[in-house]
Amino acid sequence: MSYLNALRLHFAGQFQANVSTVNNDPAHYDNAQFKASYQTLQGANMRPPNGWFNPQGDGTFKLLGCQVMSAWTAQGMVSASDAVLGCIVADADERVCGKMADLDPEQQLVSEIWGLQMRIANAQGDTLLQGEFEPAAFIDIWDRATGSSGGDTIAGATYQSVLQNLVWGDISASPFLIALQAAATDGLLSIKFNVDGMNLDFTSPDFMCGRVVGTIGPATASEPVHLLIGRQFMAAPGPNPNFFVPLGGLNFFPAVVDTAGGLIYLDLGNAISTNVPGGVMNNLGDLTLNVYDPIMTPGNPAGSLDPIGTIPATGPGGYSSDPTWYGRTAGVVVLPVSAQLLSLIAARPLIMTGGPNIEISEWSSGVFVRADTFVYRLSPDQSTTIPVYAMQWGQPLQGAAISFVLDPSQLQPTPNSWPYVGTGPAVAAPTTAISFNASGVTDSKGVAALSLSTTDPGWPRLFASGDYGIDGQVYGIRASFTNGVEYTGPVNQWNFISVLLWSGFAPPNPVTWTEVGPILQQYANLYPVMSRFLDLGDYDSVVAHAGILTLAFSLDVHDPNSMPVTRDLSPAKRAAILSFLANPVPGKAQAKPEPTHAPAAAGHAVVGRSPLPQGGKAAAAARRLILQHP
């Protein structure tokens, strides 16, 4: 059971992701070279680059004006009398909203949401349902707005997670919510939402806001949190991507076959492109779901495609002609399947076709493999076991041999060709600091175990100044089927595990400002919104605020008030800061960087790419290692 089933609601509205962009640039982590101008908006044409497009961001992630657009049960869409249709989907009302954070300046394409509380509330503001969003990273980012030029605004991506620690209010006026509560027997709800149309115009009232549409349904503790066990449609890469361009016009998406109900559920919410950011879906033609029939006849020597059902592009309710379609459905489509075709699709690939050159399918073998949680933060000498799920024809695949290899190709080191940076820090080195089993075999639940252990990587991203630099190192690990002959098809470039391994840190006892000052100075540089309250780079200011800082640094990392917002502070450094705050020994005096202005830069291009118009995810994506080594 998941969000993709008969019992579900769809919501739509806006999100705000008010992230700071100063920490997008690895060069800004060098305290000795940091300039005050890096905390100001970038200049025209990125000259000078400065703090990119939102240097004063506070990391806030919130939901704005999200309405329940429709709700469904096994009997169909609920009637207008169901109170859920007048409800909103909102974030917390009695605490601060959630926070968004990148894993690392050299892995910015798995941005996570932390500390988000979500609610369903009625028109009077009464909370009917409250749950905690399990932190999740986005996946399947792509160039969704095809009629616009590059940059972050054209991107679309998706989040999948669960709501836990559920608290139910008075839901007696909503038969749908009563049914949802009854189905959530493990105290969990499944949620998937898609984000696109980000507004980066700082003069706009919608600055740092975008569109969000999503689906909520029941979940069980036995299923993965961030991954759907189902049929997986795989897109081949097209040419000249900003993030990813699907060759067949449709992005990656999942489906679930309900054999008992004779239905198939398709989630196209992050699969259909738009012309403008956050706009109506492009007309890709009527989309027809087919199953491949391998029986060869004289007229079909290669077999045939048997149509299951069609999703109209235009006309009443058409996905392209009806501007309400996306909000009402969140891209979820349900098609009936005949008994004859149900038996056929049980072990045959599904293929979606549309207008000219529009096509996407499962692998011919129907298999798929992915880690459920694919972002990790680890300390030296820490071990963890990562569940990796394999499936075939939408069911767990037992006995499959899975290989695990280091793959840094999608990480984003800063190229040395960017003159304002100088020598860019390398990623994924040393490889000896991270070790894991080269292969595994899936169990009866289709799960293979990736056993990961670490040692101290040292300071591979230390700057010439000798300051702490970028803490630790970031690595990529990719899982794949060992049998590459039988199990082949398009590979999702985003489908890998990202690991931030922190450097060891053992300060003297007592801890003094000599040790923690450079750490806090770096946060003062990279998160300038804090300067409205205190100067983290100043001993006296930190000591004067020791009480509130002790509270913030002591909070669980899942708490939205936890410091730092960026979630990139190692436990060892956190313990050192808390020790200093309890006994603030001055230590050796340190000179603070002088506020200066950054020199204008003459344009910064990655090999084979044009100069970037702005910072952000697009700039990070353009730095990917695979693009630097064509």
Image: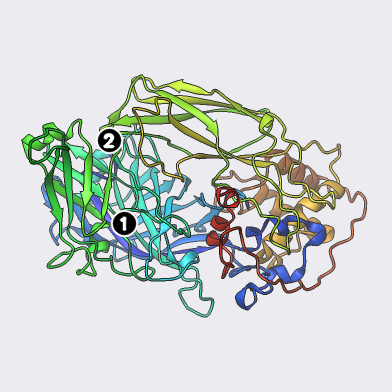
Residue 517's x, y, as percent?
81, 52
Alpha-carbon span between mark 2 and mark 1: 19 Å
> Tag 1's secondary structure?
loop
Residue 276 image-quadrant placement: bottom left
Q: Residue at x 72, y 32 (%)?
A: 456
Sequence-first tag of 2 and 1: 1
Asked if one can make out residue 216 in the rendered structure from this viewpoint, the answer is: yes
Is 499 located above or below residue 235 in the figure? above
Say what amino acid the circle numbered 2 marks. Ser
Residue named by callout 1: 249
Most extreme residue toward the bottom is 203
Q: Nearer the viewer, residue 536 or 315?
A: 315
Q: Are marks 2 and 1 in contact (CB under 8 Å)?
A: no
User: How many numbered marks, from 0 up?
Assistant: 2
**Against 260, is 283 above or below?**
below
Please give left or right for residue 354 compared with residue 512 in the image.
left
Q: Is 470 situated left or right of 496 in this image?
A: right
Q: Which residue is mark 2?
A: 364
- Is residue 555 shown left or right of residue 395? right
Q: What residue lies at 87% left-to-right and 49% top-to-bottom?
A: 514
Q: Quadrant of residue 64?
A: bottom left
From the top left corner, tell me how far across and down residue 51 is, in percent.
Answer: 66, 68
Residue at position x 52%, y 52% in the image: 111
Question: Which secondary structure, mark 2?
Answer: loop
Query: Where's residue 306, x and y in %?
Result: 11, 43
Three-letter code, disc 1? Gly
